[in-house]
Image (cartoon, rainbow, N blue to C red):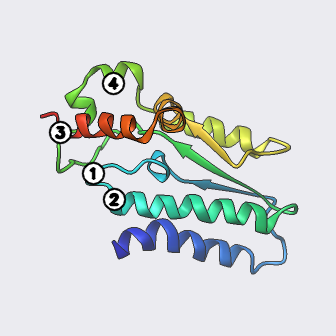
Amino acid sequence: FKNILDTNLIGLFRLLKTIFSFSNKPKLIINITSLNGFLSLPNFGLYCASKFAMEGLGLALRYELAPSTKVVNVTPGALFMKSARKLPHKPAREKFPLINWIMPLTSPEDVSVVIEELINASSVPPRVLIGRDAHIINLMQRILPFSVFDRIVFYIWRKK
């Protein structure tokens, strides 16, 4: 857990502390978080905790550093990676292949396009979701009662 926090949260904090020690302060901070910064799933609790913390830090900095520095949390959904890590469980995408059609993986190129747009934007929102899965899950969390959302997660998780 300490290694995850050192990488995702403490590393971010140290980088920001160093950047703000220079006389030229940044005009924009793009904080790359994750879908797991607002969705916690089984076997991902430690990673999700670090990403939830990054989301919170980004939002706090948005207000603390305004108006001279703009801060945006960029929240990609599940990314397509050529060398994916082996998971300790069967992923939902293998259990329910329909998920791949409804919520395809986000490419690193999709993320880079959004980042370029943010760099050139005159204003930025607090959070930018990237990928259909990030948008769908965010919407589901906002409109579904907790009991319904929980049942969906438990069903997917328990399915062999």
Left or right, residue 38 beside residue 119: left
Residue located beneath label 3 in the image:
158
User: Which residue corresponds to the image point at 77% horizontal and 63% vertical from the top-left?
Assistant: 63
Circle nearer the N terminus (3, 2): 2
User: Which residue corresponds to the image point at 87% horizontal and 63% vertical from the top-left?
Assistant: 68
Please tell me whether mark 4 sits on a helix, a strand or a loop.
helix
Please tell me whether mark 1 sits on a helix, a strand or a loop.
loop
Most foreground residue, 96 or 24: 96
Kindly indicate whether the residue at mark 2 contacts the one at mark 1 (C-beta within 8 angstroms). Answer: yes
User: Which residue corresponds to the image point at 33% horizontal and 49% vertical from the top-left?
Assistant: 41
Circle nearer the N terminus (1, 3): 1
- Rendered-image quadrant of the C terminus: top left
Residue located beneath label 4 in the image:
99
Left or right, residue 84 beside residue 53: left
Percent position (x, y) of residue 80?
39, 36
Left or right, residue 93 beside residue 124: left
Real-space Cα separation, disc 3 to disc 4, in angstroms? 16 Å
Identity, as a three-letter code, of the amino acid under mark 1: Pro
User: Which residue corresponds to the image point at 24% horizontal and 34% vertical from the top-left?
Assistant: 155
Identity, as a three-letter code, of the amino acid under mark 2: Gly
Identity, as a three-letter code, of the amino acid under mark 4: Ile
Real-space Cα separation, disc 1 to disc 2, in angstroms? 6 Å
Most foreground residue, 106 or 108: 106
Most foreground residue, 49 or 94: 49
Residue located beneath label 1 in the image:
42
The numbered disc on residue 45 is 2
- Rendered-image quadrant of the N terminus: bottom left
Kindly indicate whether the residue at mark 4 contacts the one at mark 3 (C-beta within 8 angstroms). Answer: no
Q: Residues within 10 Å of mark 2 (few under 14, many from 20)?
A: some
